[in-house]
Image: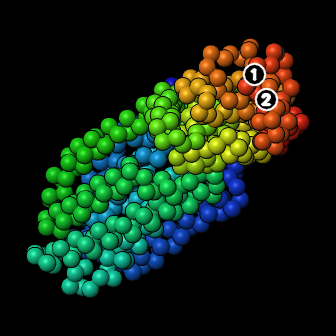
Amino acid sequence: MRASSLTGRITRCVAVRDWAWWGLDPMLRGYVAAIPAAAAVVILFTASQTSWHPDDVAKFTLLLCCGMISVASTPRIMYAFPGLTRDFSAIWVLPTAILLQPFYAAIVPIFFSITLNVFVHRGVPHRAVFSAAAQSLGYAAASVVFRWFPASIAGHNPGTGAHALYWCLAVVAAEIVGSRGHNFLILGAVKMSAPQLRVWAMEWDRDALQALFVEIDLGVLITLAVALSPSLVVIAVPTVLLVRRFLVHPILEAQSRVDAKTGLLNVSTWEKEAETELSRAIRTHSPLALALVDIDHFKQVNDTYGHLAGDRVLKAIADGLTGQSRDYDKVGRFGGEEFVLLLAQTHEKDACKIAERLRTYVASLTVPADDRPDAPTLSVTISVGVTALARDESRELSDLLAAADSAMYHAKQAGRNRVAFAPPLRDMGVGDMGVADVDSAASLGSEPLPVGGTPLSGHRVVLVQADSASASLCPRR
């Protein structure tokens, strides 16, 4: 089995035309190629400027071995949740950048990347190369920045008293340049590949800042230990492993809150947060709306292209919903091909506009069925049911969901690829829904949706978008 697996990996590597690299957008492909090329130039230039000393080689070897042990023991779960990937290799790159010449800081990420991909997490090759190159550039710059400080500060010996404080501040400044430079290069690629994502916010969320502070703290301590006595670095390895184990807990906690395929809130978490937001809206007399989204003819995607292609569509739409919504909206996966959004501080008119924007965005979205360069691209549409909190109607989350579900049902009955609105009413099922109160339809600038059933006083379903475009799957090459 291992031999066949190895043979398969070799075959995929040799099959150059099947590389996922060719499926990238041309501009993104150029960016992803430019960073490793720049790193190669930096490595060659710094190598030509390096003075070779046995002590430096010995320190580099010691830091490299300790770092490879640390990286190889990274828990796999730290790669299972988007946005929280942390191998903490920077902890070992920093002392290399501070205590040795820039060439060493430029090449050490390459060894760590190889270790990571062999022993922990086998990633996509071009991503691994790009990430290593970005870290190489970041910490080569950090090494240069540290040496910009006066020679009385930027020495290999931290000294004592005020000098030690200034030395530590210089190290922290270098670490910020290295780690943030590395991350910004990567986030630039992410932004180019998914423009709808608010990637820069990922850099400053609580988990990212916590990891940054841990990296800075441990990096400075290890740098200080190696500066005082290289043998002390061996003691730091268990400390790094222990601290990293503690950081697994928030990852597990975060994993329990989200849907694994889409990264959105799962049903239970969404309901808890929605209940909290609903209570706040009722208490403060604030507007609130809810939208239920269903992918039209999603079964055709799975039946025609397979469930992996279906998962790609789910993830693309989930990213789109997140990117098109606001920071304080609650976006979750409701189950299957359904998504749900709680829109805080939103009146019904604005909720319908938001839903229409989401519908338009998804209708224009194309998703490749797989990583092959010539893979067919898939297009789908969505039907959206919208409801809003009203003073004289039900204020239970279950009733809001029922109303949104009923509106979505009628949007599908009207031909799909539509947005429909309905107010919440207690104890109202889909079979009871009808059309009434036409005046409220005019307030949204639309005609009431003509559906079957007996009209009920005070209850209406309003079609806020009457696009007659087909909702069927339209693969394009």
Q: Gap between marks 1 and 2, in whole Å? A: 7 Å
User: Which residue lies at the image location 61% right of the left edge and 29% below the top edge?
Assistant: 392
Query: What residue do we see at 50% from left, 68% from top?
Result: 39
Label 1 close to label 2 by CB (< 8 Å): yes
- The residue where tag 2 is placed is 437
Can you see residue 345?
yes
Secondary-structure class at tag 1 = loop
Name the quadrant containing residue 37.
bottom right
Tally of numbered tags: 2
Indicate the amino acid at tag 1.
Ser
Q: Answer yes or no: is residue 376 visible.
A: no
Instruction: Locate the C terminus and report the quarter of the image it occupies.
Output: top right
Q: Which of marks 1 and 2 is nearer the N terminus?
A: 2
Residue 450 versus residue 417 in the image, above or below: above
Residue farthest along the left direction in this orientation: 161
User: 151 left or right of 449?
Assistant: left
Residue density around tag 1, few if under 14, some if 14–19, many if 20 or more, within 10 Å: few
Is 397 above or below relative to 227? above
x and y, in percent, of residue 344 in the image: 56, 42
Colouring: rainbow
Of residues 56 and 135, which is closer to you in this image?
135
Which structural element holds mark 2? loop
Q: Nearer the viewer, residue 320 or 124?
A: 320
Q: Where is residue 240 in the image (x, y as percent from the top left)?
A: 24, 49
Residue 180 location (% of width, % of height): 42, 64
Q: Which amino acid does label 2 sit on?
A: Asp
Instruction: Report the side of 450 relative to 72 (left or right).
Output: right
